Amino acid sequence: MPPVSNPKQVARELRKVRQARLYEDTPVPDTVLEELLEVARWTGSSRNTQPWEFIVVSDPEQLRRISQIRTPINWVADAPLAIAIVLNGENPLSEAFDEGRVTERLLIGAHMLGLGGGTAWFGDESQQEVGKRILGIPAERTARSVVVIGYPTTHKDHRPNPAAAGRRPLPELVSYERLGERAAS
């Protein structure tokens, strides 16, 4: 791949990837889903263990059942599609890292394909067990979330008590050489 000729444009597009929770009632085309699953399959993992399997959920009843695991994810019921990430459970620490990588890749891929996405975390261990039962996942495997994919109607958080918007300024976040060492003016 040739070097990016406009890094600001690429960075601007990446900054547009947002959590979506409200979607049109339009199915995700199979060809788009297949491409997203290829993106997931080709995501890097610790020591190339590829510790995952994916469950595509498009049945409205399954999505409704997932949405009832805990109140903050009730928006899943109205989504057209979700992809559950099922980890093999052999190395919880590296699998948590790998789960984050594949989740973010799916969200970026969805954005680049003209869709939106959101992550719905099942919750604590007992709530994760409910999610695993709904999806037919054995107890020894790990499943904490689904990545919801669709055509968003908004990226605004419609839930009661939404998180604060915006980002902290870079000077508050970035140190040079050692923590707390700020750039010279």
Image (tube, grey):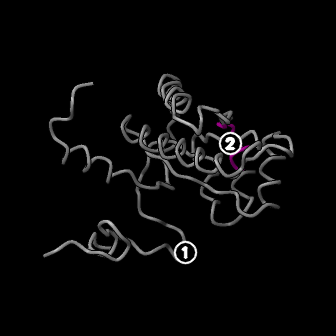
Q: How many marks?
A: 2
Query: Which quarter of the figure has residue 120?
Result: bottom right
Query: Which quarter of the figure has residue 167?
Result: bottom left
For mark 1, give the secondary structure. loop
| Residue at x 20% of width, y 35% of height | 4
Q: Work out whether residue 12 or residue 21 is closer to the camera in this orientation and state it.
A: 12
**As drawn, is 94 to the left or to the right of 40?**
right
Q: What mark, if any, has residue 60 been given in the picture?
A: 2
| Residue at x 68% of width, y 46% of height | 63
State whether residue 112 is above or below residue 143.
above
**As drawn, is 9 to the left or to the right of 24?**
left
Query: Which quarter of the figure has residue 141?
Result: top right
Place of residue 165 in the rendered image (x, y in percent of width and height, measured from the top left): 38, 71
Secondary structure mainly formed by the magenta segment: helix
Q: Is residue 65 magenta?
A: no
Q: What mark, if any, has residue 160 been given in the picture?
A: 1
Query: Which residues lie in the magenta part?
Result: 57-64
- First reached walking from the N terminus: tag 2 or tag 1: 2
What separation in Å lies between label 2 and label 1 (alpha carbons)? 24 Å
Within-10-Å neighbours for mark 1: few <14, some 14–19, many 20+: few
| Residue at x 26% of width, y 74% of height | 182
Place of residue 116 in the rendered image (x, y in percent of width and height, measured from the top left): 44, 45
Quadrant (top left, top right, bottom left, bottom right) of the N terminus: top left
